[in-house]
Amino acid sequence: MENLELYLHIPFCVRKCAYCDFLSHTPEKGEIEAYVKALKEEIASYKNIFDSCQVSTIFFGGGTPSLLTAEQMKEILDGIWTHFRLEDTAEITMELNPGTATREHLIGYRSAGVNRLSIGLQSVHDKELKMLGRIHDYQTFLNTYQGAREAGFENINVDLISAIPGQSVESWEESLRTVVGLNPEHLSAYSLIIEEGTPFYEIYGEKNQETEQIHGEKQREEKEKLPSEEEERLMYERTRELLAEYGYQQYEISNYAKPGYECRHNLGYWERVPYLGLGVGASSLIRYREKEYRYHHVTEVDEYIKFAGTPEKLVREPEEVVRRAQIEEFMFLGLRKCQGIGKSEFRKRFGVPIEEIYGDILQKQERLGLIRIGADQISLTERGMDLSNYVFAQYL
């Protein structure tokens, strides 16, 4: 029985952060209730379709899933248990923003079946949180974290962001040391990306940089500066070193865990396990009759609510993932993991030795110290992780 992962998108936030380009907005009155009803309809519409699959992980992302009540979360999960086959030890993760869930809410989420939380802290410094446009301060995070422990959660991830405007290497290290002192099971440490269409892009994007070149130093001094490339790299190096000191194993470019607490859902993405996206804007990767297809949901909430019970109207035209694209994804997703990819797995999936397709590239990257090639495994070196985008581009 093939494993299947479920991703459920909850597109609602109290307020959108200054750096965020995810599909989310502040809900109107009654919109959350209507959306939950639509989600349950979509879940029911897949009855008997995935009987040959076993759901191994469920992930509630957003947006802010913790804007849902515990009862709403229970209704959604009850629907999944009714219409899908679930693994007994399925990992069920819910993203949560500090201050959006009381201790009673957290107890309710745990009772509903959620067994892993991912809390978006981002920084322990209130000034940096304000800079990012977060709705909480550090004390609010502490209250939420403690409430999660009291509610019985034994598998918690904390998200942090480095390279924030005005951030120093020292303040980043303080965030890391403060968080590991709380002893979470997992840490995700991402470097800030300036995305188009966000308030940050208006301040720090390419067009603004061109304006600075015209107006000079005065405009640059009026805003917090982004850390330099050298500072950003040093932050990444210190993250690896410091978290290793505290017993966290790096298992992917930006993710660290205590042994046995790696995020199974994300590992599934990097290993190209089939997944079904539920909710507005969600994507799916489905295998059918030895072919792969990618589906994308409609991106307007009103349209999603209208067609939730009829998947053929809910998804755009399916896109077949051709063999070449499968091979490319196998390489650049698999190499994100510290253990890398297996030559034997490549041959099993694609019927040819990896050297037949990428032999010259592999030799070059090994010679440059970007990858290490073992008897079966191929993985990034530390230098390769620093230059991962360059490495991945060679396989496209």
Image (cartoon, rainbow, N blue to C red):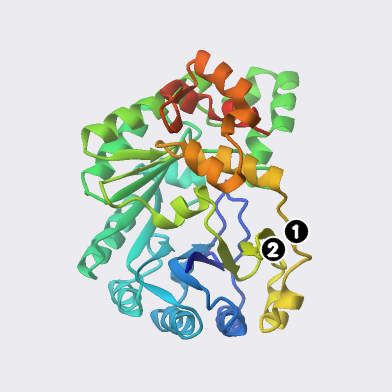
Q: Give, as a three-letter code, the residue at label 1.
A: Glu
Labelled disc at residue 319: 1
Q: Give x and y (percent) for residue 293.
A: 69, 60
Q: Is residue 112 left or right of residue 64?
A: left
Within 10 Å of disc 2 (Cα), the crowding (few <14, some 14-19, many 20+) is: some
Q: Is residue 258 left or right of residue 96?
A: left
Residue under label 2: 295
Q: Is residue 286 visible?
A: yes
Q: Is residue 333 visible?
A: no
Compared to residue 150, the image places residue 319 above or below, namely: above
Which residue is painted at 27% across and 55% down in the image? 142
Which of the two residues, 255 or 320, is positioned nearer the viewer here? Answer: 320
> Is disc 2 placed on a helix, strand or loop?
strand
Which residue is painted at 43% across and 33% down in the image? 376
Which residue is painted at 61% across and 45% down in the image? 350
Q: Give, as a three-letter code, the residue at label 2.
A: Tyr
Within 10 Å of disc 1 (Cα), the crowding (few <14, some 14-19, many 20+) is: few
